């Protein structure tokens, strides 16, 4: 996926649900910030391949662990506040343009592994009610999350 909006990093975001329709939320390492698994799309990379790659890297789930329930119709953007842009994503982007995916665990006992990478992004995870992430994420992502959850909720 090439960003439609100049200055925005192409990105995928995943809402992973279990059999009780709880969603997986993860805490960024060395912070108190929570978010859904998400990550950048490499140049020329297929968007679904990027989604499964990020899912594996960030939370240790493979394509075999989940069913792809659906995806956002288009992309959703958010801006990184100017005050922290230089510290986020190498200061190269003013925000992210995300394609959102809804994934359902095939088995609730699928193991979440936050240490699949040499430098893990997350240090903790929780299964929470569908809308709870809106109260736990950083302010500048809140509207993007609200838009994504509002769209994906009809697929459950």
Image: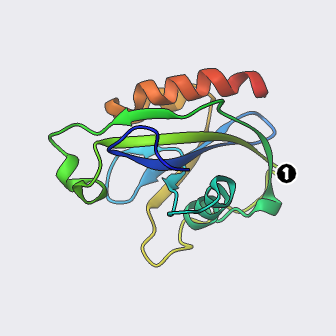
Q: Is residue 9 left or right of residue 57?
A: left
Rendered residue at 28%/39% (across/down): 80
Look at 52% across and 57% down and name the residue there. Answer: 41
Colour style of the rendered protein structure: rainbow
Indicate the quadrant where residue 59 lies. Answer: bottom right
| 144 versus 123 height, above or below | above
Count of number-bearing discs: 1
Point 23% across, 37% down: residue: 81
For the point 33% across and 32% down, which residue is it?
140
Residue 115, image x, y percentages: 53, 71
| Residue 155 image offset from top left, x and y in percent | 77, 27
- Image check: 94 left or right of 126? left
Residue indicated by mark 1: 106
Out of 135 and 150, give the one closest to the viewer. Answer: 150
Across and down, in percent, residue 29 comes to 38, 59
Furthest residue in direction bottom, as rendered: 118
Nearest the camera: 69 or 16?
Answer: 69
The quarter of the displayed image where residue 54 is located:
bottom right
Give coordinates of residue 84: x percent, y percent: 19, 45
């Amino acid at each position: 996926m090439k960003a439609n909006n100049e200055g925005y990093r192409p990105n995928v975001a995943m809402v992973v649900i279990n059999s009780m329709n709880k969603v997986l939320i993860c805490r960024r390492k060395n912070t108190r910030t929570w978010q859904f698994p998400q990550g950048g799309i490499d140049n020329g990379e297929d968007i679904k391949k990027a989604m499964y790659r990020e899912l594996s890297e960030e939370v240790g789930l493979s394509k075999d662990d989940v069913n792809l329930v659906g995806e956002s119709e288009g992309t959703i953007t958010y801006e990184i506040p100017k005050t922290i842009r230089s510290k986020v994503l190498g200061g190269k982007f003013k925000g992210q343009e995300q394609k959102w995916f809804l994934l359902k665990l095939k088995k609730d006992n699928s193991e979440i592994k936050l240490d699949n990478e040499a430098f893990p992004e997350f240090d903790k995870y929780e299964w929470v009610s569908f809308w709870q992430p809106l109260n736990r994420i950083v302010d500048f992502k809140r509207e993007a999350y609200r838009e994504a959850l509002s769209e994906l909720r009809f697929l459950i």
